[in-house]
Every structure is written in structure tokens, then in C-alpha cells.
Amino acid sequence: MKKITSMILALVFAVSLIGSASAKTLKIQLTFPKTSYDGQIVKMWTDRVTKLTRGELKFELLSKGEVVGLKETLEAVDKGLVDGGAAWTHYWSNYHPAAMLFGSPVAGGGIGLSTKSWLAWYFDNGGMELYDQLWDEMGMNVKGFVMASSGPEALGWFKEPINSMADFRKYRFRTPPGIPGQTYKDIGVASVSMGGGDILPALEKGTIDAAEWCCPKPDSVFGFQKVLKNYYLQGLHQNVVNGDIYINGDVYKSLTDHQKYAMEVASEAMITRNITNRAVENGKALIDLTENHGVILHDTPADYFTEYMNAAQATIKKNAAENAFFKKVYDHMTAHAKIVVPFIAQMETSDASIGTAFAKQQ
């Protein structure tokens, strides 16, 4: 009996050594501080992958700039300087304009897309296959996973109330990069792109005097309420916005099928958790901002919606005419919208009406 027990213990020890030897730690550089709200979301993803692989895959998260600058993050993943990266897909619109259609289809792509209808396209109507093609179009040796959806995002913060687009155009306004920011320029807004951690210092120095980032919780973490008090929730520039994890292509190919599947499952799970977590945290933050920090919540001027939507549609059509892959994705997305958007729009109208009625009673 002792001999059998010893053999079993030896076998268990040997198996544990094999598992230990096969464990990998992947270094992931973020395009934001790892202590930020978005950094916490990425950690939720990495924790899930580690648990699903029983410790075979572990992760070291690196803040923005620890290895390379923000703008060089995707290239660092491509070249293997880091094992992976995390950002929002639209950050890479300078490599290919179609990145915007996956990360932030400006003004709902001009075809009525919401987060729900975009995710329906991505998961169930061919969008994921086109997303995988995007990295090949860029010439990037990466495997991407959409793992966070956080739209719609707020219009932003202003020194004084804005009652029209004429008021809006008085401000130097921090916007997202790529087509959403360019669309602001097209309607005469002085658009300036910069990372989230740079916004508050720029506001304090007067480099910019209005800004958008995301939503009440992330905005309050950055401290915009210290400088600006007029806040507008309804905006079009990122009514859908998605974040990704990128893994170097060679690193990804070296993973087992189970490890790859763990990343896929964790990504799907985190999309749901990101939406629900942000709903709770943004709701709490909005109450805190308005009740404890003197922030005033306003309705966005009506002429913003018509001007921005028209400019967005023109920009999208221009890119479709100039780039074959952009057109391929947009045509596919439009065909999907004709099927799904009429249904979802009616359902979301009901949700919005019920929610607005409740909010007015508070």
C-alpha cells in the first residue's frame, strides 16, 4: 500500500511539474494606466483567462508607455516587443479607416446601429470574420478579441452651457482620434486628440477648454469635474465603442486550442460584464457628480444632432468610395442593419420611454 501511495504522489508531483513548466506569463501593454477604470476591466479579462486555463496563462499588465508610447502599442504587439496590447479599435484608424467601423462606427455608422445591434452583427451575422480580416488589411501580425463595449458615450464637458453649435464652436475640444474626431472638424469644431491621462493637465493649462472621454465614472476618475461643471450625456461621436485585446500572432499560434478558446470565452463574458458594470458605476458616478461636485447636467442642443449626423454620413461615404475593404465592411454592415435595426430601434425606444418617465419622477 505504501508503495502504491508513493507512486501516486510521485505521479501527482510529476504532473504538477509539467503544468508548471507549460505555464506562460504574457506581457500586455495598455494604452491607459493599469490603475484606471479601463485597466481594471482588462484585469477582469486576464483573471478569467487565467482561471479558465487553470493557471497555464498568466498576465503582466503594463501601463501606457512602459515599453513603447501609446501610438506605437499595436506595432509593438505586431513585432513581438510585447505579447499583447489593449486599446479601442478606433485608435488604429490611422493604419486603416475601417478600424472605426469596428471600434466606433461614428453616429451609429449613419445606419442606426446601437451597441446591441452592432454586437448582433459581430457575433451572429458575419462581423467577426471581417474583424479578423482587418488586421491582415493593416499588415499586423496580431489576433484581436473584442472584449469591452461601453457606448453610448457622453458628448462631454464645457466651461459654460452650450445652447447651439455656434456656442460649441467657441471651444477647443478633446475628441477621439480618427473619423469621429475628423467629423467634428468637418462641422467647424477645433478638435484635438490626446490620451485620457493628458486631458486634465491640458484643461488646467488651457491647451483645451472642453473635452470628452467616456462616461460619468471614467470621466470622474480623471477629475474633469475639478475644472469643468457643465456636462452633456447625449452625443453621437461614439454611441457604439468597443475595446480590444491584441495578442501577437506568433504567440497566439503557440497556444493550445483550450487556451485560445479560453480567450474567446473570456472576451464574450467580459462584453456582458463591461456593459452591466459600467451601467452601475456610471449611474453612481452621475449622482455623485451632480450632488457632490456641482456638476450640472444639460440636454445637448438639437442642431448638434443634425449637423454631426450629416457630416458623419458624408465622411463614411467618402471613405467607402476610397477604400475597398472599408466599402466591403460597410456594405455588409448596412445589409445587417436593414434586418436588425428596425426591430431593435423600436424595442430601445420603449426602453428609453420607460426609463425617461422614471427618471423624471426622481
Image (cartoon, grey):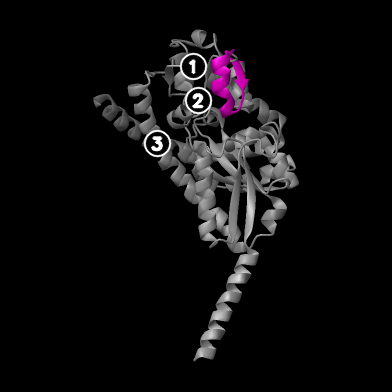
Q: Give the range drawn in magenta.
A: 186-206
Q: Do the numbered discs 1 and 3 sit on residues whose CB atoms are within 8 Å?
A: no
Which residue lies at the image location 58% right of the left edge and 75% below the top edge?
A: 13
25 vs 40, left or right, is right
Distance of label 1 from label 3 (alpha carbons): 27 Å
Q: Name the N-terminal-most of marks 2 and 1.
A: 2
- The amino acid beneath tag 2 is Leu
Q: Residue at x 44, y 45 (%)?
A: 273
x and y, in percent, of residue 285 in the image: 39, 30
Q: Does the magenta stretch include residue 191?
A: yes
Q: Is residue 86 left or right of residue 284?
A: right
SS type, badge 3: helix
Residue carrying label 1: 304
Compared across the picture, whether 360 is left or right of 55 comes to: left
According to the picture, the residue beneath numbered tag 3 turns out to be 281
User: Residue 281 sits in which quadrant?
Assistant: top left
Q: Residues within 10 Å of mark 1 (few under 14, many from 20)?
A: some
* Secondary structure type for disc 1: helix
Regarding mark 2 in the picture, which secondary structure is present there? Answer: loop
Vertical arrangement, residue 245 with respect to residue 356, above or below = below
Residue on which disc 2 sits: 236
User: What mark, if any, has residue 127 been given in the picture?
Assistant: none
Tell me, yes or no, whether the two marked residues, 3 and 2, touch with CB atoms within 8 Å: no
> Which residue is drawn at the image coordinates 54% and 85% (left, top)?
6
Residue at mark 2 to residue at mark 1: CA–CA distance: 9 Å
Contact, CB < 8 Å: mark 2 with mark 1?
Answer: yes
Earlier residue among tags 3 and 2: 2
Residue 225 seen anywhere in this rendered image of the structure: yes
